[in-house]
Image (tube, rainbow, N blue to C red):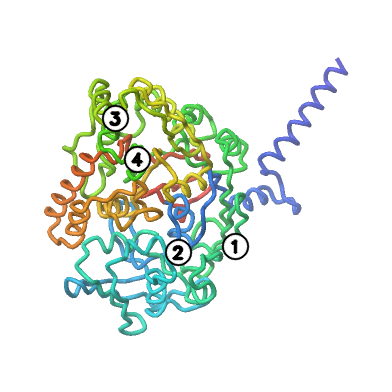
Amino acid sequence: MKNKSRVIMMVLAVLLVMSGCSTNMGANSDGQEGGQASKKQDRLVIVRQSDVENLDHHFMSTINAASVTHGKIYEGLVGRDKNAKIKPLLAKEWEQLDDTTWEFKLRDDVTFHDGTPFNAEAVKKTFDRLTDPKVASPRAVVFKMVKDVKVIDDYTVQILLTEPFSPLLSILASHEGGIISPKIIDKYGKDIIQEPVGTGPFVFESWETGKEIIFHKNDSYWGDEPNVNEVVFKVVPEETTRISMLETGEAHIAEPLSVNMMESVKASANLEVYRSEGFGTEYVGFNVQKEPFNDVRVRKAISHAVEMDSIMKGVFNNIGKKANSLLGSKVFGFHPEMKAYEYNVNEAKKLLAEAGYPDGFKTTLLTMDSKERISLAEVMQSQLKGIGIDLDIQIQEYGTFVEQATSGNSEMFIISWRNATGDADYNQYNLFHSDSSGPAGNTFFYKNDEVDQLIEEARSEKDQQKRIELYAKSQELEMEDAVYIPVRVIENMAAVRKGVKDFSISPAGYMEINEIRID
């Protein structure tokens, strides 16, 4: 009995030691209970599937990257509130003086992280860099209509347009509208900025490519200060590892969360599932310049051969609404009456035969290394065998995937568009206008003069109902041209450790962490 008691006491001692190591809730060196716990709570750790491609808002091609810096390092003249409505930010107020002139009154109490005063000259310098052809920013296309940024006085600036542009405020509220320190612009010029310096509540500390990005709290922030002193974005490609890090307390948030892992997270006593509907959609795209996809009959045939209802159920467990276009249902300009191609194998075979491929052909489908997208690709591979198409699935790491798709080195691809503004223009102009081919968003390399004209008319139209009608027509033409196969409206999903409060992901897909508290 003595030996048995001794063993039990030893086991209990080991468990107590392990408990203290894993939770860090023990006394500090001064004997004050909870001292180390308080220190831990000052540090927010977010584990993510993939790294950013860069930290320069003028060169970012993805919301995945912008989500790290937007609203945290960089801020714009305007932002969005929790209901996605436009709100003042670095600009206190604004007025549209005429069809092509917008005037903004700026805050006079803001300083950049490097000590440079925020003023009208800083705003002008940011937009001059963004729109400079020598810089060749892939995001310049969204401000194509900006003729000049005029300094009126230290805290008044005017944006002069070449033509009326109704969605201006929505784009200024997106990451492309982030204002950059003039000193950093002088340092890097037309090269990609490696040290992001803005006016936001967090200050950039370091970036170890492929591993982690670290921010610390901006003690001189002009607005409400964050509740955490440090934020670490860790790159952890394997989802099971990300979830495991949440379980052990090594991390607080894991994103994205896959459909496959959702039930495991729900069953955990330590974790919660975060879900919210986004502006964007997932879809299968065709490079319309590559044979045989330069023939609309081939694109229509494949569209008819994909049975989306079974994909929604089997791959996505009916999470996220089935899409009918590339606009989410919350986006201004959404076309609720539009129909995608119905599942019809006989029609698909007929169209392939008419296009000269009665026995089908072999092609490649490009996807990033996401479990859901790989599953989607595998189901499509099986379905397309029914019309004689041999689909070779190519799975790539996220950065490589984006580079290959935007360079036009693809035939078919599975991708998403988050829509950073909630306005159809951001979707239509970036994805379908011929000026946006490549890194700007049009990875279909699609050109339709009538669609271009409709998009341009909608940009300059003041009457919001007329804009909706113009976007409805452009979407119908894009569907008639079978440029893509809509899959689903994106649901923002993340796994969150219990005790983490006030975390959210905006409909545009930006992580909102400025108000996070860790109990």
Is disc 3 surrounded by few (<14), some (14 to 19) or many (20+) residues within 10 Å? few
Q: Earlier in the sequence, mark 1 or mark 3?
A: 1
Q: Residue 302 placed where, x, y %?
A: 31, 30
Of the residues shown, which amino acid type is indicated by label 3?
Answer: Gly
**Callout 4 secondary element:** strand
Q: Which callout, 4 or 2, points to the residue nearer the camera?
A: 4
Say which residue label 3 marks.
356
Figure quadrant of the N terminus: top right
3D distance between C-alphas at marks 3 and 4: 18 Å
In this rendering, the answer to whether 394 lies above or below 118 is: above
Of the residues shown, which amino acid type is indicated by label 4?
Answer: Phe
Q: Earlier in the sequence, mark 4 or mark 2?
A: 2
Say which residue label 1 marks.
205
Say which residue label 2 marks.
74
Query: Considering depth in this image, is 7 or 190 the residue closer to the camera?
Result: 190
Say which residue label 4 marks.
286
Of the residues shown, which amino acid type is indicated by label 1?
Answer: Glu
Q: Quadrant of residue 375?
A: top left
Q: Earlier in the sequence, mark 3 or mark 4?
A: 4
Q: Quadrant of residue 149?
A: bottom left
Q: Which callout, 2 or 3, points to the residue nearer the camera?
A: 3
